[in-house]
């Protein structure tokens, strides 16, 4: 059976109305199957040459920053200046699929439903990625499980598990190591939704979650010993709160962003990790790297080839929809300025600048400052492309708009050297959403100029 998915790009008005509907709900309460079971492919050969969860961030609060008390890295953080880039593991991966093991899981809450493919990538350094697609409201993006083999035990540490289809479980089993620890790193719905079903498959694994979970997939505070935990599965500890450190803390640095305001439906939390033995920063949504070439191979399991090949600027439009920048096209060149500003850069996604950092600038600044104090030379994220060769200073530069404008380097320098050159007019969609949130009392009001450093457009 061939499942074809055509792409229709909605108007700005329809996107705004849809997002407001989603936020109100929260406040009130495919292509043919592959013929071979396992095969090795080249991502470079499959690339075409040419969203992520909004709701918790739309309603992000800001008051406190939680940080785990794990041991800090012994080595001096690498501050050498470099331009972030995708490593050879991205371009020459040992990509494996196992479609005959099954690609259907019900219910998955968001598409794909009937052909939810999983692609497995060897990230090197005894780390792997299991990649699926996340799609809603004409936004489609990759979502990644990161797996680390622990040095102490040889078992697997699974970060942000996704829906356990037959293919997903087979590719995980093929690593040949037991799943010892399961980590829910944030409270965004696309990361929390599959946890219960995944945990059922590994009842002996210990489970660790970020604080402040709320909504239909469970709830918890900042401590599993003094506060009620209702997640629908056993929880062995809450990260970044008052609970004891997990047994794998000897291998990881970690720090937790936890922000909450009473005006919002619930808090926002994200835990960042640095695996010290491999100098790898493992992030969920903190930063992303958008490659110029795309879409990634897994898009071909959801969109038909005619849509991807015949739709002008398919990849550019997909990226802009995922980060909530407008589909504005330069009338002279035909390029999309928003995409041009983001491509081949390590950036903070505009949607998180506008919804999280705009309400919690101090907390976000302190959080990323702690991340930048670690010693790592690459980054693996949950969305878009990974792994990325990057230094701690590269990660901190992605948050340069949070620095004081009158400090050094100057704001002009930040605009030129660090911040993506997003046109001021391309922030209007997110500004309109923030304005609607304020006018309709849907959540906390944005208090920080998240578009700092934007570029005046000549159009």
Image (cartoon, helix red, strand yellow):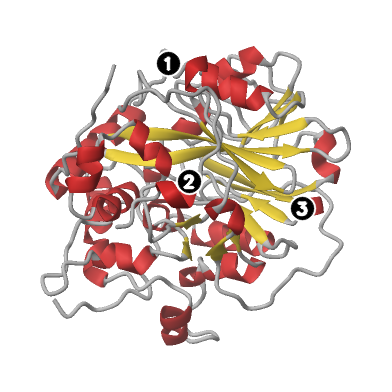
Q: Kindly report the distance in space between the C-alpha atoms of the residues bearing marks 2 and 3.
A: 21 Å
Where does label 3 land, which residue?
Answer: 278
Which image quarter holds the N terminus?
Answer: top left
> At 34% from the left edge and 68% from the top edge, which residue is drawn?
341
Q: Name the residue under label 1.
A: 104
Give residue 77's position: percent from left, percent from top: 76, 68
**As rendered, which of 130 and 364 lies closer to the eye?**
130
Q: Are marks 1 and 3 in contact (CB under 8 Å)?
A: no
Q: The C terminus lies in which quarter of the figure? A: bottom left
Is 258 above or below relative to 304? below
- Position of 46 with respect to 422 (left or right) is right
Residue 408 visible within the image: yes
Local packing at callout 3 (Cα closer than 10 Å; few below 14, some 14-19, many 20+) is some
- Report crowding for label 2: few under 14, some 14 to 19, many 20 or more residues within 10 A (C-alpha): many
Residue drawn at x 55%, y 48% is 381
Residue 446 sits in quarter: bottom left
Q: Which of marks 3 and 1 precedes in the sequence? A: 1
The residues tagged by marks 2 and 1 sit, at their Cα atoms, a distance apart of: 22 Å
User: Can you give x and y, in whole percent of width and height, for residue 426 in the image?
Assistant: 24, 64
Question: Which comes sooner in the sequence, label 2 or label 3?
Answer: 3
Q: Are the residues tagged 2 and 3 within 8 Å (C-beta)?
A: no
Q: Which mark is residue 383?
A: 2
Disc 1 crowd, CA 10 A, few/some/many (<14, 14-19, 20+): some
Question: What is the secondary structure assignment of the residue under circle 1?
Answer: loop
Looking at the rendered structure, the secondary structure element under dot 2 is loop
């Amino acid at each position: 059976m061939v499942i074809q998915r055509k792409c229709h790009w909605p108007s700005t008005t329809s996107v705004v109305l849809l997002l407001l509907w989603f936020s109100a709900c929260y406040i009130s309460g495919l292509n043919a199957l592959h013929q071979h079971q396992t095969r090795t492919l080249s991502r470079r050969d499959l690339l075409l040459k040419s969203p992520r969860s909004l709701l918790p961030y739309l309603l992000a609060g800001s008051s406190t920053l939680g940080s785990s008390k794990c041991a800090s890295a012994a080595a001096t953080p690498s501050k050498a200046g470099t331009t972030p880039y995708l490593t050879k593991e991205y371009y020459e991966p040992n990509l494996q699929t196992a479609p005959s093991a099954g690609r259907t899981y019900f219910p998955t809450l968001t598409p794909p439903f009937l052909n939810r493919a999983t692609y497995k990538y060897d990230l090197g350094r005894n780390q792997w990625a299991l990649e699926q697609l996340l799609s809603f409201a004409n936004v489609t993006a990759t979502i990644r499980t990161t797996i680390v083999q622990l040095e102490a035990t040889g078992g697997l540490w699974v970060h942000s598990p996704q829906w356990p289809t037959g293919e997903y479980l087979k590719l995980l089993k093929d690593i040949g190591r037991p799943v010892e620890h399961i980590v829910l790193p944030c409270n965004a719905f696309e990361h929390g939704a599959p946890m219960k079903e995944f945990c059922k498959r590994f009842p002996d694994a210990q489970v660790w979650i970020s604080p402040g979970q709320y909504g239909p997939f469970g709830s918890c505070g900042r401590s599993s010993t003094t506060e009620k935990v209702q997640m629908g599965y056993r929880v062995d500890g809450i990260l970044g709160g008052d609970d004891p450190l997990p047994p794998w803390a000897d291998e990881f640095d970690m720090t937790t962003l936890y922000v909450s305001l009473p005006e919002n439906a619930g808090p926002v939390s994200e835990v960042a990790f640095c695996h010290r033995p491999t100098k790898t920063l493992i992030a969920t949504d903190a930063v992303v790297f958008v490659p110029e070439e795309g879409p990634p191979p897994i898009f071909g399991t959801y969109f038909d080839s005619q849509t991807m090949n015949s739709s002008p600027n398919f990849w550019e439009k997909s990226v802009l929809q995922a980060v909530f920048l407008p589909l504005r096209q330069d009338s002279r060149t035909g390029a999309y300025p928003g995409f041009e500003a983001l491509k081949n850069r390590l950036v903070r996604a505009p949607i998180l600048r506008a919804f999280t950092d705009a309400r919690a600038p101090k907390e976000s600044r302190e959080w990323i400052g702690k991340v930048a104090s670690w010693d790592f030379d690459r980054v693996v994220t949950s969305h878009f492309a990974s792994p990325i060769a990057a230094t701690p200073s590269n990660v901190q530069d992605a948050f340069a708009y949070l620095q004081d404008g009158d400090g050094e380097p100057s704001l002009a320098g930040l605009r030129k050297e660090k911040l993506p050159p997003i046109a001021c007019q391309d922030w209007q969609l997110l500004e309109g959403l923030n304005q609607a949130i304020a006018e309709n009392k849907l959540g906390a009001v944005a208090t920080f100029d998240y578009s700092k450093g934007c570029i005046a457009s000549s159009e």
